[in-house]
Image (cartoon, rainbow, N blue to C red):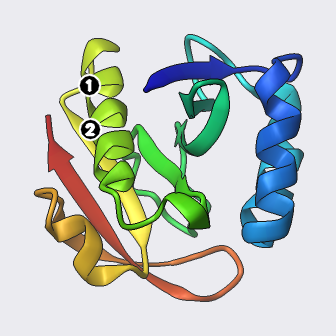
Amino acid sequence: MQFKVITKKSKETNDLLNILKTEWGDAFQWLTDVIDVWSQRGFPQIVVALNDGEVIGHYSLVSHELVKDDHGYTPWLGTLFVRKKYRGHNYGSILLGNACRRVKNMGYNNLFLATQHIQYYEKFDFKEIGLGIYNWGEPTKFYQKEL
């Protein structure tokens, strides 16, 4: 498996957007909103996992989460997605591990996330650190993983 930080002009960008449009419409809209500010060094970063050139999934790293008060925490895991046909094969764990290593290599000691997927991230040593409200009004929990 290969990991690649993609930009607006990357070959894989259209593949990822087409996949998200059919499999996760909410993320498709968010990614199309930030496509012009993608970065390979800072944030946001969109990283795809590839197997023989085919997109398996992606994750994004962002400096701020779409919550009413992010308490100044940074960086955040913005999205984590595995294509439906690849689910159940540990790819989510592989993507998450790569995200943690990338953030650590960037000099950060923590990775934060806001999610409603309560039991998933605890399996990977994310600890609940508080509650929040997404900008669109839904409640969420904040998590932190020490790297």
Q: Position of residue 142 (x, y in %)?
A: 33, 68
Q: Residue at x 66, y 24 (%)?
A: 53
Q: Which residue is mark 2?
A: 97
Q: Which residue is mark 1?
A: 101
Q: Is residue 122 visible?
A: yes
Q: Measured along the vertical axis of the image, is residue 137 above or below residue 85?
A: below
Q: Residue at x 27, y 63 (%)?
A: 143
Q: Position of residue 73 (x, y in %)?
A: 36, 46
Q: Helix, strand, or loop for circle 1?
A: helix
Question: Which numbered tag is attached to residue 27?
Answer: none
For badge 2, the amino acid type reads Gly
Asked if the residue under mark 2 is in contact with the one under mark 1, i.e. CB atoms within 8 Å, the reply is yes
Task: Say whether residue 125 is left or right of residue 100.
Answer: left
Quadrant position of the N terminus in the picture: top left
Q: Residue at x 57, y 69 (%)?
A: 68
Q: Measured along the vertical axis of the image, is residue 99 above or below residue 145?
A: above
Q: Position of residue 125 (x, y in %)?
A: 10, 57
Q: Residue at x 78, y 54 (%)?
A: 19
